[in-house]
Amino acid sequence: MIRIIPFIAQILFALLVFQDAKERRMNYWLWAAVVLVIPIIGIILYFIQRKPKF
């Protein structure tokens, strides 16, 4: 049970990045994949690269 919590958190972060990137008209599939593959670095890169909301 304890081992599944980080996996669920990783998927949750990817979904949140997916939704946020879609609202900001960015490549949301790419950013969700990056966060899934390399979670910590992917989230940091996303926050650096994200565009302002329209």
Image (cartoon, grey):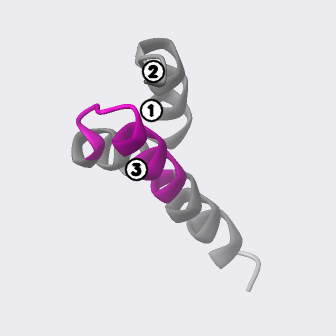
Q: Given the image, on which type of amino acid does mark 3 rest?
A: Phe
Name the one closer to the observer, 40 or 43: 43
Residue 28, horizontal then vertical, whole percent: 29, 43
In the image, 27 versus 8, the foreground residue is: 27
Say which residue appears at 50% left-offset and 63% top-offset: 11
The image shows residue 7, relative to residue 30, as above or below, that is below
Residue 18 x %, y %? 40, 50
Question: Is 37 drawn above or below residue 15 in the view shown?
Answer: above
Marks 2 and 1: in contact by CB < 8 Å?
Answer: yes
Q: Which residues are magenta?
A: 14-28
Q: Are marks 3 and 2 in contact (CB under 8 Å)?
A: no
Q: Earlier in the sequence, mark 3 or mark 2?
A: 3
Q: Looking at the picture, which amino acid does disc 2 mark?
A: Leu
Q: Give the secondary structure at mark 2.
A: helix
Return the residue at label 2: 45
Instruction: Please check the rendered image and state whether residue 26 is part of the magenta-colored stretch, yes or no.
Output: yes
Image side of residue 35 versus residue 26, left or right:
right
- For residue 15: magenta? yes
| Mark 1: few/some/many CA within 10 Å (<14, 14-19, 20+) | many
Q: Nearer the viewer, mark 1 or mark 3?
A: 3
- The residue where tag 1 is placed is 42
